Amino acid sequence: MRIPQPLLCFAALLLAAALATPASAASPGEDLETIAVSLRDRALASTHAHDLLRSLTTEAGPRFAGTLGDRAGVAWAERTMQELGFDEVEAEPVTVPRWVRGEAAAAIVAPYPQRLLVTALGGSIGTPAEGITADVVEVPSLVGLDALPDDAVRGRIVFLDQRMERLQSGMGYVLVVPNRLYGAAKAAAKGAVAVVIRSVGTGTHRFPHTGMMQYEEGVPRIPAAALAIPDADLLERQLAAGGPVTLHLFLSARQLAETTSANVVGTLRGRERPEEIVLLGAHLDSWDLGTGAMDDGIGCVSVLEAARLIAELPHRPRRSIRVVLFANEEFGASGAAAYADRHQAELASHVVAAESDFGLGPIWRFATGFGPGTGATADRIAALLAPLGVTHYPDPAYGGTDLAPLRAAGVPVADLTGDGTYYFDYHHTADDTLDKVDPEPLSQNAAAYAVFAWWAAESDVDFGRFVPPPDEQLFAPPPEEPEEH
Ligand SMILES: [Zn+2]
């Protein structure tokens, strides 16, 4: 892997941090920006975040909702929060759906028989035991599918063949992921018998990328699967000859009864206004194929490490800092809904929230969704993050899937966005493992969250209440992509 430019700058930062004096003994009266800088330097000089990730991926591994691994993840989070010095730790029960991937197999039967690497999309039904064999109809996108007459689709397997663009912001994902989410329902409405998609991902390895799909009420449910990217290429080449291509697909995916998981909630109790909460979030669950080192192990350990650094200061900040490791983000965001429900009465005292759930590299962008008239606050935090190589982005923050109910209730949010250039090479695949995550950018992630959380919790700034801009399009692509590296 090429070393991106920001990482080189980052190495210089690390060196400077290592040469700097150790953390000063902070007192409540001490300038809060001085302490923010000391937190940043301590984070950069440590690889503790990576140690936590090693522990999570080794001791719990894949943490798909409702599985034994998920349960092991909850136990890991509780014990880790206790060890890191949180004042309160609680596992709050969350009801989660339970889906089993089962086995998957696919092969081109004609004109040139070859086996294809495939996996079920999350939530898909299985095929009959003998599988489904049918001719393939290829479409470039959902728009292309809409344009086809039903006759061209009926009785066939629809192949959604759209490439994803590699971008630092990850916006390529947003443009292609509707194929995965809605492809089966749209194809079934036209009489298709199954759908296969080109994996929503970048890179060229042969691991198919899973992820959630959704059926539609009143539309027949058909099996849905993702082909590894080189296998989608192969199918595309056989189709390019123009003759019929016949595909065989077998999936033994199935739905089981709902079960229980938990949001793991750890709080550093504020010394002056404990009822006011600065929330740092990430999701504890992962898909079942990899060990969830990136998605969302990176997020979990970044916010845990930020809290650990703050917990080691001689005094708690004025406000409480709460780390929430959400259950089941990947398969329906039931943890997010459960948290908002359970904490409904105190949402008004959630002063600001940020979730770490994206990127495989240093944080490069900071955006805010604070209340009106808080520009100076955003600028002050941005100035503290700037030495980490983080730029201030003008658009309103998204907040993250798990913060959506909070944001909708007016809780101000911030985005500290990781570098997504290589993230989607591994996202939702068997290749989401510890070896892909370098310690240095992980320390930078922890540094950014520590600075943000400390400043938000120690200052008496009012972040206001978030008001979504009119006609907000959360996933509208940014007007112009910053220079790629
Ligand atoms: Zn995630």
Image (cartoon, rainbow, N blue to C red):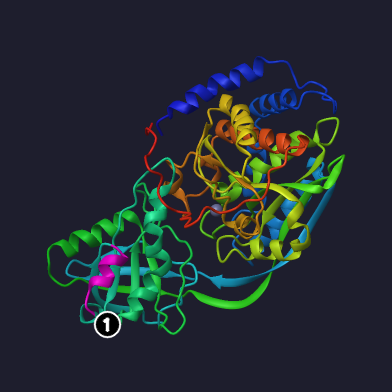
Which residue is drawn at the image coordinates 37% and 69% (left, top)? Answer: 183
Which residue is drawn at the image coordinates 62% and 55% (left, top)? Answer: 407
Judged left or right of residue 52, residue 186 is: left
The residue carrying mark 1 is: 155
User: What segment is highlighted magenta in the picture?
Assistant: 141-149
* Quadrant for the C terminus in the image: top left
* Quadrant for the N terminus in the image: top left
Quarter of image, res 383: top right
Which residue is drawn at the image coordinates 46% and 71% (left, top)? Answer: 214
Residue 386, position in %: x, y?
56, 27
Residue 70, position in %: x, y?
65, 61
Q: Measured along the vertical axis of the image, is residue 109 above or below residue 335?
A: below
Which residue is drawn at the image coordinates 40% and 64% (left, top)? Answer: 180
Residue 187, position in %: x, y?
33, 75
Please state which of residues 168 and 69 is positioned toward the viewer in this rendering.
168
Residue 119 visible to an observer of this rendering: no
Asked if residue 147 is among those painted magenta in the image, a careful observer would answer yes
Please state which of residues 348 and 37 is positioned toward the viewer in this rendering.
348
Helix, strand or loop at mark 1? loop
Magenta stretch, main secondary structure, is helix
Disc 1 marks which amino acid? Gly
